[in-house]
Image (tube, coloured by chain):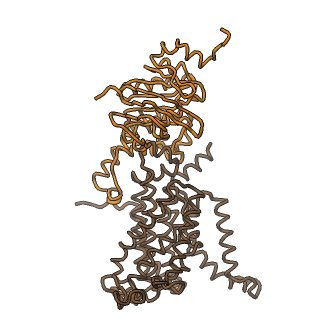
Chain colours: A orange, B brown
Amino acid sequence: MSNTLLELSGISKQFGGLSALTDVCLHIRRGEIYGLIGPNGAGKTTLFNVVTGLYQANSGEFRFNGHSYKTPQPHLLAQAGIARTFQNIRLFANLTALENVLIGRHPKTRAGVFGVLLRNKATRDEERASTERARELLRYVGISKSSQTLAKHLSYGEQRRLEIARALATEPLLLALDEPAAGMNATETESLKALLQDIRATGVTVMLIEHDVKLIMGLCDRVAVLDYGRKIAEGVPDEVRQDSAVIAAYLGVDDAA
Amino acid sequence: MKIIKFSKQHLMFCLLLGAVLLLPFATDALLGRGWVRIMDFAMLYIMLALGLNIVVGYAGLLDLGYIAFFAVGAYCYALTGSPHLALAFPLLFPDGLHLSFWLVVPLAALLAGGFGVLLGAPTLRLRGDYLAIVTLGFGEIIRIFMNNLNAPVNLTNGPQGISMIDPITVSGVSLNATQQVFGITLPAVHLYFYLFLGFAALVVFVSHRLEKSRIGRAWMAIREDEIAASSMGINTRNLKLLAFAMGAMFGGVSGTLFAGFQGFVSPESFSLMESIMVLCMVVLGGMGNIYGVILGGLLLALLPEILRHSVVPLQQALFGKMLIDPESLRMLLFGTALIAVMLYRPAGLWPSRVRRRELETDETV
């Protein structure tokens, strides 16, 4: 088993005439927490959507867990082991928290139309196991009290946690989080950090986009920096922090100096 | 000794079942035989509404051409269970094709399901109003085909429709004649009522199983957020097609029942108004809730008849003469009732468990 989980090379993505990503390479190793940062409009979310199959790259290669994908589609990648959360939370608003997590079990369950109609033993067992697992996950992220609450009535922090529980329900190899700490206060961010470290400890590789540089630096094993659709730096947080290109991208370059 | 627990729920169920079984006799005695026939049609509408509920209520795909599948099922039995094919293919079927109804039911279900996929496939990327327009077009295409397929080969007999369709038989006993069962006299309309009741029960059962399952949840995920659903590993294409196919199958089976019951089908039974009526049943009753949809189907099937029968006597009692034509007043009252329900109970008369809770929670906030 190769040490690399996700390998993107030469990824370019254009929207009409606009180049959102140019020749981006990405190697994510098994078991690490990988951060993606960059100024606004650097192409972080675009790259993220390419990773999760929502966008198809115009060129480049996509390998995940030893398989090459020509046209990676979201549901295929989810079945292969990439789960994601969304920058603007996208829960199933009119379903309960428990049902949201149960939907996350979809790729790990098999029941077809006949199984469902006959409700045979295999289906019943599967359903029971799914429900049990879903309750476990709700407990794990700390919102088991709200399992019967509609997703849209949960508090903001709970919604973020529910999204993570739902993603974990697919038993991912790679958990991709799009700005998980956005809108959270310092305490919530701290507990999120602990949760992510905990998730990594269970063997799940984590990739996240974040604006909170402090969180990224404290959490990630490696960090990549995007600017104008190109990767300008990659490495351990301390290295990246001192990289002149990164400082220039974030603070601007003084031409006179 | 094993004692079967007889809970309150069981008791309620038995009472309800008894009441439903006695319904045709009670209706016959109190209101007359015509009303039993109306109850039969109400049963058909309930089946249609439950079928559409899968597409609209569960998967969230707005379908304005649903009656087309009803038409496919009805014509399927009309062609294979009547002398009509003798006109189109005199050499092949000199007496027409007279297939057993029970053979045609699965055939019609498959055919209608196929048409469901046919409608679903090109519309996978569409949602909401755009999907509604395409499905509306599809419904009209089917109707216009039925209207015009009498030349060059007379397949559907055009606007005249197909008549002399074989009555439905259950183990050799025709439902079109009065029968004696255990000394009880059962007229044809009663027999059809029980047949339709059986089919409706089956449809309820299937809906119920689907709703609380992996498949039903996947449909609801697509309804709520398609992008998030696909990110959870749900193959949205296949599941949308499945929803269209399952809904269409229910429509197709109801269609065969309709054809056998009426003995006659013509394109005018499958107009856009009928599609809208079935959609109203789903929305008014409570989208996504089986019992709500049943209630909606029952009310909307009966309400126009009640209005039709009460408008004339009411006017004569009030004004001594008839001022407004009952037919036009009927639609006016019907429309008003719809508006009132949508204003005061936007989630439907009997909303689904989740939606009701949602309203309750909103009040406490």
Q: How far from the left and from the top, in percent, is residue A61?
A: 41, 34
Classify B220 as above or below B284: above
Classify residue A197 by image quadrant.
Answer: top left
Q: Quadrant of the C terminus of chain B?
A: top right
In this view of the protein, which residue sits in the foreground, B79 or A106? Answer: B79
Identity of the residue drawn at 52% across and 11% down: A242
Which residue of the protein is positioned furthest toward the top in this rendering?
A257
Quadrant for the N terminus of chain B, please.
Answer: bottom left
Residue at image point 38% right, 90% down: B90
Task: Tell me where residue B140 appears, x and y as whole percent.
Answer: 56, 72
Compared with residue A57, is residue B180 higher up or lower down, i.e. above or below? below
**Can I make out residue B186 in this image?**
no
> In the image, residue A138 lies at what x, y percent?
43, 36
Asked if residue A121 lies left or right of residue A207, the reply is left
Looking at the image, the residue that sits furthest to the left is B1
Q: Position of residue A177 (x, y in %)?
A: 48, 31
Whether residue B342 is visible, yes or no, is yes
B234 up-or-down from A155: above or below: below
Of the pair B360 and B238, the residue shown nearer to us? B238
